[in-house]
Structure formats: structure tokens, C-alpha cells
Amino acid sequence: MWAVVAKETGGSDVLALVNIEIPIPGEGQVLVKVEACGVCRHDVLVRQGVFRQNVSYPVILGHEISGEIVSTGKKIKKFKTGDRVVCLPWSNLCHVCKYCQTGRNASCPDAVLIGDTGLNGGYAEYVIIDEYNLVKLPDQIPCDEASFISCAIGTVFNGVIDIGKVTPRDTVLVTGANGGLGIHAIQLALLSGARVIAHVTSADAMDELIDFGVDKVIFTDRGEDFSPIIDDLTHGNGVDVVIDCVGTPVFRPVLKSMAQYGRWVLCGQVTGDFVKFSPAQIFLKGINLLSTYGSTKEHLESSVRLVKDGKVKPVIAKRFSLEHAKDAHNALESGGNAGRIVLTISGENL
């Protein structure tokens, strides 16, 4: 099969198209013919060597996967050859630890993120997936739109609904609002009845965000303090909830934009940089500093239903074929994309 492999860390040039053997599913696993794979910021950070936890090379990147089951290992109970599926990005779950028992599988000590280690990731024609991590994909959802449901929609479903507990009374700020996480966080916050303010550092995405129904789109240069604008828009009250898909680069303006007792939900981090702050800046204002680390199977199933019912629209910024994975990474790093970048996988053009 054809796959894009990173043999070491570095720029996008380390991504090489190679031909390797098709993997064989073991007990409780299936072999999925990959139809599409989302390109996540996490992929870039792994390739660059910024994210190193449980990462090893050579590696086939890619954990946002949709496709069709083409063969199964032993003891497969709920799926069969020909099923269209989308998956959670984890493998090797123990199913007995306190995290697995409470649905927080991403924190299982045995969990391995697909695309972080070894030659089993979504930037390939085939990939091995554990049965537990699969969800059946309704026929009306195209595979390219489905590929990133778990990561880009399920994660912010967790952040907006479960962690942020957004209500119609809230004013919500979404940072990195045009990105794969942000553009879907906007839709979920609006679905919850909230007033939504979107922050972007690319003017190209502003019109599309307005079309979704956000109250205001704030455009500033990267690193610019946008808190005075938030102050004006909220009459000095600040925002009740922040769905923060950026992290360090916007930390200080977000901190100054928070309302009393506001909920700040950290969903993403686009750099490897740290930030300094005084805890008093948090507790004297009663701010709840929260976070979401991926999605559970229940989040994925709920997100698939929302997409199926037309309540959330997966937004694709650009599509690239597998052999142009390097261009996909370059496009993601250059910014200005409204939605997720997706690799469409097909052997026909390789």
C-alpha cells in the first residue's frame, strides 16, 4: 500500500510517499480502507518534534480517519466487511483502568494515539483500528466530512456541552475561530443558544463565520491584545465562556476578557511555548480554568448524530490527495483556512 511516512522530525520535506506492506488485523481489530484523513495541528507538532510524548519514528501520521472495513480479525462482534466507519483516534485501550471505566479513554495509561508511533496511521491507504473505537457512518455523511468528526467536532462538543456547559444566557468567545476546532465550536455554541464572538487572525475567514450566525468577528494581528474590543462588545462585563483553540498566543488577552466566574475551556495549543501568570489573576476573579482532552465514544456518537441531522456542518477548508500531504501541511501552517484540511486517499492517482 502507499503511505506517507515521516522518518524523522523536521519540516514538511520529511514526509515521504513510500510503498509498504498492508497490515494484518489482529484479534478484536479491523482493517479499514482509508477514504479520508483529516490533517490536524497535532500532526504538524509531531512532525516538527514539538510534541514528543509517546511519539516514535518512523511514523505514519494521521488520526482523523474514515473509510470502509475490508477485513476483520477474530472476535469481531459489531462490525463486518463493507461497513462504513469513523473512529476514535486511540488504540490499545485496557478497558479496566479508572479512565476507561468512566469513558475517559484518552487518559488510559496503555492508550496509543494512532499516527503518533509506528507505521499505522491515517496517511495511508489502509489502517488497523480496534473494534471498540469504531462508530458506523450513516450513508448520507461523506467520508471526507466524517473523517474529522471525532477530533474536530467531538473535542469541542466535549468542551462546549460537557465542560463549558454553555447556555442561552452566555456570551461565548471562540479563539482560532476559523480553524478545525473553532469553526465547529462556534456551531455548537450557537446550537446551545449562546451569543458568540469569534476571534481570528486571518481576514479571509471573516465572511464565512458571519454566515454561521456569530454576533461579531474580531480580526487582529497575531499577538495583538483584543481585550479592549471584548470590553466594548460586552459593556465591560467580559465573556462568560471561552472556547480557546489557540492557547499561549492568546493567553493574556483572553485572561483580560473573562467575566467574573467565567469558564475558560482550553481545547488547543498551536505552539510549544509556555506562559507565565499569577494564580491570583485567576482566583480573584473566580475564573474556572478548564480543559478538554479529546472526545469519548459517546461524544463521537453524539457528533455523528448532529451531523446526520444537519445540526452541525463539518467544514472543509481544502482537500489534498495523499501524495500531496506535504502541501497539506504547508497550507495548515500558513494559516487562513476556514475549517479542516483533509487528505482524500485513493490509489488511483498514486
Image (cartoon, grey):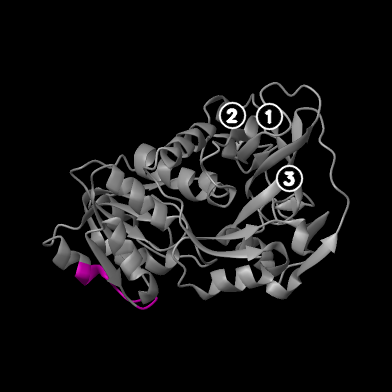
The residues bearing labels 1 and 2 have C-alpha atoms spaced at a distance of 7 Å
Query: Which residue is label 2 attached to?
Result: 100
CB of mark 1 within 8 Å of CB of mark 2?
yes
Q: Which residue is located at x 55 percent, y 69 percent? A: 332
Which residue is the extreme one toward the right? Answer: 21
Q: Quadrant of residue 52?
A: bottom right
- Which quadrant does the C terminus fall into? bottom right
Query: Which residue is label 3 attached to?
Result: 33
Residue 50 visible in the snapshot: no
The crowding category of the residue bearing disc 1, from other C-alpha atoms within 10 Å (few below 14, some 14 to 19, many at least 20), is some
The residues bearing labels 2 and 3 have C-alpha atoms spaced at a distance of 27 Å
CB of mark 2 within 8 Å of CB of mark 3?
no
Residue 11 position within the rendered picture, expressed as x and y whole percent measured from the top left: 68, 74
Disc 3 residue type (three-letter): Lys
Query: Which residue is label 1 attached to?
Result: 94
- Which quadrant does the N terminus fall into? bottom right
Residue 162 position within the rendered picture, expressed as x and y whole percent measured from the top left: 38, 37
The crowding category of the residue bearing disc 2, from other C-alpha atoms within 10 Å (few below 14, some 14 to 19, many at least 20), is some
Q: Earlier in the sequence, mark 1 or mark 3?
A: 3
Disc 2 residue type (three-letter): Cys
The crowding category of the residue bearing disc 3, from other C-alpha atoms within 10 Å (few below 14, some 14 to 19, many at least 20), is many
Q: Which residue is located at x 57 percent, y 27 percent? A: 98
246 in the magenta segment: no
Q: Earlier in the sequence, mark 1 or mark 2?
A: 1
Q: Which residues are magenta?
A: 221-229
- Which is more foreground, mark 2 or mark 3? 3
Residue 115 position within the rendered picture, expressed as x and y whole percent measured from the top left: 69, 52
On screen, residue 290 versus residue 236, left or right, reads right
